[in-house]
């Protein structure tokens, strides 16, 4: 029992020292405080390199790091998590970004985008590997291999983005759509999960020429034990089972939705 406790403390110290995420969370606001101009080199590729992996806020209701930003043409949302339980919830329930241009904090009659939506009857989570010891060449090679395999299995199954309330757009669109709604999500070799989304300002009825305050809602959607139904996708007839990225099958426990509201004004 004592040895087990020592191992737990050891791994926790490794995660704190290596990731630095719990320490960083204490220094960040719960909700982003101001508008941010997106980097000129921003790409929607499931990586936060252009942000130097330093996001603007850490929200305690959802346990995610995030940044909302804009440039002249697009609105962006970048999300990160190193918490494996939160990542599994995102994979099973998806993240929904809702926008209310009337600045009323209600998702009714608003616009929303949900990602990721997997192929029909495909339900995925992932199996976390034991903590990797920093500085070990063998561990780094193993981590890179696990990252590449996991990302391929995940992206091969992500097919759709769901939209509601956005004019001239279907409810369910391909991730390779021509509507300039872009989304991507990947793991890095430390099992940090980065989720990114961009949408044209004109699709949201906004313009950098006339910026005004609007409300946004970020939600990790509910996961139910009965059917694990994806937003906009028919439920899996096998019930509360999910497909692990390594091919195994496992039960998915019920998870209530968590969300929060923020306000944003476009930055010129």
Image (tube, helix red, strand yellow):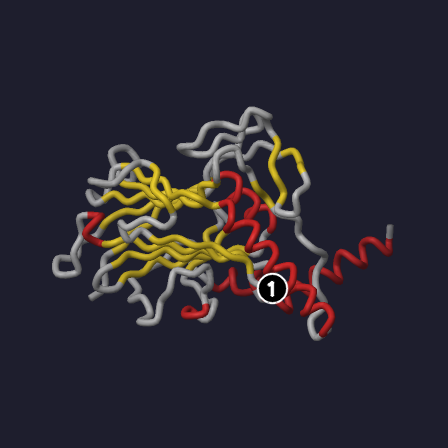
Q: Position of residue 48 (x, y in %)?
A: 45, 65
What percent of the width, then of the height, locates residue 158?
47, 45
Tell me what residue is drawn at x 31 percent, y 47 percent: 216
**Observer-nearest of 234 and 163:** 234
Instruction: Using residue 245 as the reference point, say whether residue 53 is left or right of it.
Output: left
User: Quadrant of the image for the C terminus?
Assistant: bottom left
Q: Residue furthest left?
A: 210
Which residue is drawn at the image coordinates 66% and 52% (left, top)?
128
State how many labels appear: 1
Relative to 34, 204 lies left or right:
left
Query: Along the horizontal axis of the image, is 125 left or right of 257?
Result: right
Q: Secondary structure at mark 1?
A: loop
Please tell me which residue lies in front, 257 or 27.
257
Image quarter for residue 106? top left
| Residue that numbered label 1 is attached to | 189
Quarter holding residue 105? top left
Q: Considering only vertical position in the picture, is 94 above or below 68?
A: above
Q: Is residue 237 above or below residue 248?
A: above
Tell me which residue sits at (33%, 55%) in the image.
198
Q: Splitting the image into 4 quarters, where does residue 50 fall?
A: bottom left
x, y percentage for residue 218?
39, 46
Q: Pointer 1: residues within 10 angstroms few (<14), some, or many (20+)?
A: some
Q: Position of residue 241 (x, y in %)?
A: 62, 32
């Amino acid at each position: 029992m004592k040895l087990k406790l020592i191992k737990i403390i050891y791994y926790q110290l490794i995660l704190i020292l290596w990731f630095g995420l719990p320490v960083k969370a204490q220094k960040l606001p719960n909700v982003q405080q101001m508008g941010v101009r997106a980097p000129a080199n921003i790409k929607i590729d499931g990586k936060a390199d252009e942000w130097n992996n330093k996001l603007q806020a850490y929200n305690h209701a959802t346990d995610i790091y995030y940044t909302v930003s804009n440039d002249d043409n697009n609105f962006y949302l970048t999300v990160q998590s190193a918490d494996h339980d939160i990542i599994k919830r995102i994979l099973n329930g998806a993240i929904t970004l809702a926008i209310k241009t009337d600045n009323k904090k209600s998702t009714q009659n608003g616009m929303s985008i949900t990602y990721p939506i997997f192929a029909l009857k495909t339900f995925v989570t992932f199996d976390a590997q034991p903590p990797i010891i920093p500085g070990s060449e063998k561990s780094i090679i193993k981590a890179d291999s696990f990252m590449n395999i996991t990302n391929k299995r995940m992206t091969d199954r992500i097919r759709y983005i769901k939209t509601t309330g956005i004019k001239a757009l279907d409810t369910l669109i391909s991730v390779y759509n021509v509507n300039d709604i872009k989304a991507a999500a990947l793991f890095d070799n430390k099992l940090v999960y980065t989720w990114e989304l961009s949408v044209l300002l004109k699709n949201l009825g906004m313009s950098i020429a006339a910026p005004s305050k609007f409300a946004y809602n970020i939600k990790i959607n509910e996961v139910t034990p009965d059917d694990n139904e994806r937003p906009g996708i028919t439920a899996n007839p096998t019930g509360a089972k999910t497909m692990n990225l390594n091919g195994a099958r496992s039960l998915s426990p019920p998870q209530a939705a968590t969300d929060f509201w923020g306000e944003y004004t476009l930055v010129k």
